[in-house]
Image (tube, rainbow, N blue to C red):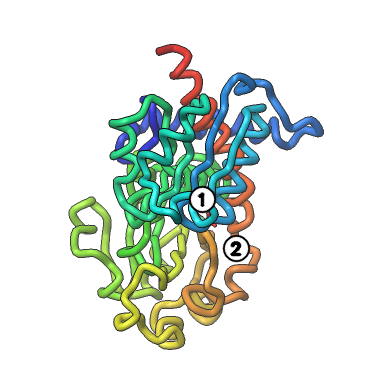
Amino acid sequence: TKHVLGIKYLTAADVELILDTAREFKDVINRPIKKVPSLRDITIANLFFENSTRTRISFELAEKRLSADTVNFSASSSSVKKGETLLDTVNNILAMKVDMVVMRHPAPGAHHFLAGKIDASIVNAGDGTHEHPTQALLDAYSMRDALGGDLRGKRVCIFGDVTHSRVALSNIFCLQRLGAKVRVCGPPTLIPKFIGSLGVEVSYDVQDSLQWCDVANVLRIQLERQDTKYIPSLREYNRHFGITRARMDRLDKEIVIMHPGPINRGVEIDTEVADSSHSIILQQVENGVAVRMSVLYLLAARRNDA
Ligand code: CP
């Protein structure tokens, strides 16, 4: 494939190749000299039409470790503010001889729209509530590390605001490719009706779901994507659906705690849980650089083969 638009379009073999290649890059970035020359003839534009801390910096570091030339674009300080369209913006940047585009955009499908109109490769760094493929890949990589390798038959529960989450959908597709069992758990108002049709279990019982799973991947309530009329009381949310210390203490087993970030501490997850020895939240961030190196490297190799 020329683009990475979503996990939905990747096969199990594609996912395995990306994760295996990422393992080699993880070794590279742990060496004193962290750079390889693989992408030294490639120029990559990182286009962020929505805020980001982890994904933007992680992609930029991945590109630098691969020796690519990089340019960063943030919509809030650009001519988008003067009314320039998405397509005009991207075509103007590509006119400066850019080979690949990493883009985050609030509109689901923005990347599909562009893919049909431009020659450069596109990597989806998040499109609205749709997909966030590299997050799912780094999550899968981190789960494999934490669970000793194979995810087949492992139980992963995605907790929280599934309706507004692009991480949920990409995680579901990715985990299914790797043979894991997936459940989603949250308030009925934040679990979309279609989710059962994807072959995942649905539960509204947090304690039962924590006991069921090997890995709890906890999602943020996305206040910015909700009509303020419908936002629940955050204190009530924590009491009924939060991953709290008290709920963790009731388990008769150890589970792995994950969160894609940014965290609403004290809302979907308590600080004591997020910072506990069960949490691999910062390992997820660390692994993100190697996973994104792998995605960019493999895409560039495909371009050269084409
Ligand atoms: N996980 C994630 O996408 O974080 P950012 O929004 O900070 O990039």
- Kind of element beneath mark 1: loop
In percent of width and height, residue 263 lies at 54, 68
Name the quadrant of the C terminus: top left
Residue hosting label 2: 278
- Kind of element beneath mark 2: loop
Residue positioned most to the front: 82
Occupied quadrant, residue 245:
bottom right
Occupied quadrant, residue 164:
bottom left
Query: In the shown orientation, is residue 277 left or right of residue 209?
Result: right
Residue at 24 percent across and 64 percent down: it is: 192
Query: Which of the two labelled residues, at mark 2 and mark 1, occupies the earlier sequence position?
Result: 1
Nearer to us in this view, 57 or 294: 57
Nearer to us in this view, 45 or 235: 45
Mark 1 residue type: Ser
In percent of width and height, residue 180 lies at 37, 47
Q: Nearer the viewer, mark 2 or mark 1?
A: 1
Query: In the shown orientation, is residue 137 left or right of residue 118?
Result: right
**Camera sees residue 219:** yes
So how many labels did they put on this image? 2
Reply above or below: 204 against 132: below
Residue at 18 percent across and 54 percent down: it is: 197
In percent of width and height, residue 97 lies at 51, 24
Mark 2 residue type: His
Residue hosting label 1: 78
Residue positioned most to the right: 32
